[in-house]
């Protein structure tokens, strides 16, 4: 290819790179898009984007190993990437294993064999180091000075997007954590295994939402809003909430108000997730045939998120022990829910419950396993929040 065509091709790739990264605001997705594109543009076998965790003085990156994402952490100063982050200067090696700065950890973790390495600092608006761009194993020969220039351009283009996505991610996480903790407060008195119930039912809700044809983002929103469905129970007196036996009709009438209380607590929120939570809180005891509470809404008049959470909630309530009842086994619970399709529940959601039984049971078993492993603290916290705490708060 001539010089001119080469340039044109490169410009086209850069323009595409710019378009792709501008369109993604989720940090996770952004980083994998960047890694994929940079690999292509530099004819490298791999690209790793490390981000600097200022609080802990470490670089971290997500690596796929054995089908699962794992977080690799590298103390500042360790490895080529750690060196680059610390000194702010680039490193270009023909053979990583011949350089004392190279760290084998990542290769060991992934079973990959690194040869050539080009690493440059990723700098933010004020020249602050945000992380490191590293490309590995050029297809032919070693990385050139031209490659280094190109990688710098790509890093410069990516920097502000990464900075924004990081802020967005932090905001999202603290938002989710707050929501989850609100939900814990609400159910704290109610059940001893509150956190377990919330985790399980919100995972069920996500699975049912996916199976009902809602998109990934919408399903994830439902997962994170679902834990607040019973937040209104904070306003129900102990004498009713904790009563070991059956409720009197008057007590049950009082209990039913938890839906209204919940929607009042969440009403007119600015946040998308909280508005979704309000809709779930008020309508999660409506029934498909219109005999539910508080408003007796019928069929499609009940928002889909509430029809989904209703199935997830009752399914989990049945397979759990309560102060007023014992636990049912899974098949019994399934049979009951099927028998109530069209009456209590949206028949399509019940169909999903049946067709995704394996996935639901898997989620249930995973939650129980986590608990049995004695992860006392993390078990009380939503999986993702636990991850978040692990990465950002614990020292
Ligand atoms: P919850 O314990 O989270 O139960 C949620 C929903 O799961 C119930 O909504 C009901 O639809 C279903 N469910 C739970 N256990 C059973 C069961 O043994 N059989 C059947 N068929 N369905 C079950 P529901 O009935 O509107 O109750 C809302 C909340 O009111 C319950 O939340 C619980 O906190 C309270 N509650 C309901 N019944 C009693 C009771 O007999 N005694 C006490 N102390 N509380 C009750
Ligand atoms: C490093 O030393 O920066 C790790 C090199 C690699 O990614 O394999
Ligand atoms: C995610 O990105 O899906 C995890 C959300 C969280 O950080 O809690
Ligand atoms: Fe409820």
Image (cartoon, grey):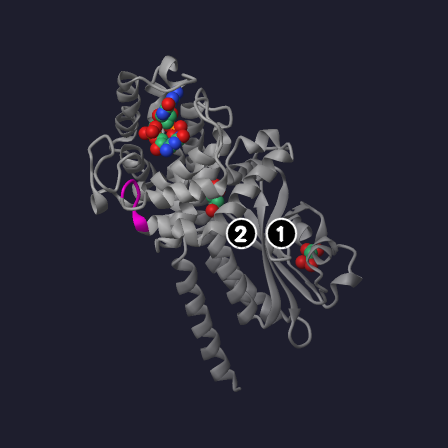
How packed is label 1: few (under 14 Cα within 10 Å), some, or many (20 or more)?
Answer: some
Quick one: quadrant of the C terminus?
top right
- Rendered residue at 61%/55% (across/down): 63
Visible residue check, residue 229: no
Q: Quadrant of residue 291?
A: top left
Q: Secondary structure at mark 2?
A: strand
Which residue is outermost to the bottom?
2
Q: Which residue is nearer to you in this view: 108 or 261? A: 261
Q: Is residue 35 left or right of residue 176?
A: right
Q: Is residue 197 visible?
A: yes
Residue 88, labelled with which disc?
1
Report x, y in % for residue 386. 55, 36
Residue at image mark 2: 123
User: Compared to 96, does 328 lie above or below?
Assistant: above
Residue 344 covered by magenta stretch? yes
Q: What segment carries the magenta color?
A: 343-347
Characterize the magenta stretch by its predominant secondary structure. loop
| Among the 4 quarters of the image, the one containing residue 187 | top left
Taking 49 as reference, is 52 above or below it?
Answer: above
Judge from the rendering whether residue 108 lies leftward or rightward of residue 194; answer left or right: right
Q: Residue at position x 41%, y 34% from top? A: 227
Of labels 1 and 2, earlier in sequence is: 1
Indicate the position of residue 35 as horizontal and vertical percent values: 54, 61
Task: Report the disc number at residue 364.
Answer: none
* Residue, far top: 239
Label pair 1/2, CB-CB below 8 angstroms: yes
Report the residue at 26% width, 36% height from top.
286
Q: Is residue 54 left or right of residue 315?
A: right
Whole-percent x, y for residue 342 in the image: 27, 46
Q: How many marks?
A: 2
Mark 1 element type: loop
Tell me how far mark 1 sits from mark 2, CA to CA.
Answer: 9 Å
């Amino acid at each position: 290819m001539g010089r001119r065509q080469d340039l044109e091709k490169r410009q086209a790739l850069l323009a595409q790179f710019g378009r792709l990264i501008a369109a993604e605001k989720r940090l996770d997705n952004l980083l994998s898009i960047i890694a994929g594109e940079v690999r292509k543009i530099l004819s490298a076998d791999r690209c790793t984007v490390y981000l600097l965790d200022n609080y802990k003085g470490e670089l971290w990156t997500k690596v796929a190993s054995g089908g699962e994402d794992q977080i690799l952490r590298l103390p500042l100063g360790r490895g080529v990437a750690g060196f680059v982050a610390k000194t702010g200067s680039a490193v270009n090696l023909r053979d990583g294993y011949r350089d004392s700065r190279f760290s084998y950890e990542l290769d060991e973790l992934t079973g990959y064999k690194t040869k050539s390495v080009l690493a440059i600092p990723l700098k933010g608006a004020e020249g602050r180091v945000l992380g490191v761009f590293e490309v590995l194993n050029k297809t032919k020969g070693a990385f050139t000075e031209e490659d280094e220039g190109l990688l710098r351009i790509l890093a410069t283009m990516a920097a502000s997007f990464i900075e924004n996505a990081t802020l967005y991610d932090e905001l999202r996480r603290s938002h989710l954590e707050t929501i989850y903790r609100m939900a814990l407060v609400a159910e704290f008195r109610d059940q001893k295994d509150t956190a377990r119930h919330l985790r399980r039912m919100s995972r069920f809700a996500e699975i049912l939402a996916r199976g009902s044809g809602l998109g990934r983002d919408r399903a994830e929103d439902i997962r994170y809003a679902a834990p607040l469905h019973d937040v209104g129970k904070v306003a129900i007196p102990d004498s009713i909430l904790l009563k070991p036996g059956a409720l009197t009709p008057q007590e049950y009438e009082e209990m039913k108000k938890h839906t209204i209380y919940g929607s009042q607590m969440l009403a007119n929120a600015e946040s998308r997730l909280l508005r979704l939570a309000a809709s779930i809180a008020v309508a999660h005891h409506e029934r498909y045939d219109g005999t539910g509470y508080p408003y007796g809404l019928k069929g499609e008049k009940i928002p889909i998120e509430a029809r989904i959470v209703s199935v997830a909630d009752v399914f989990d309530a049945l397979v759990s022990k309560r102060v007023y009842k014992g636990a049912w086994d899974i098949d019994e619970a399934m049979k009951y829910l099927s028998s109530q399709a069209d009456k209590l529940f949206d028949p399509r959601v019940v169909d999903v419950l049946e067709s995704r039984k394996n996935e639901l049971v898997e989620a249930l078993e995973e939650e129980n396993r986590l608990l049995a492993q004695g992860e006392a603290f993390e078990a009380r916290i939503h999986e993702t929040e636990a991850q978040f705490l692990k990465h950002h708060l614990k020292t």
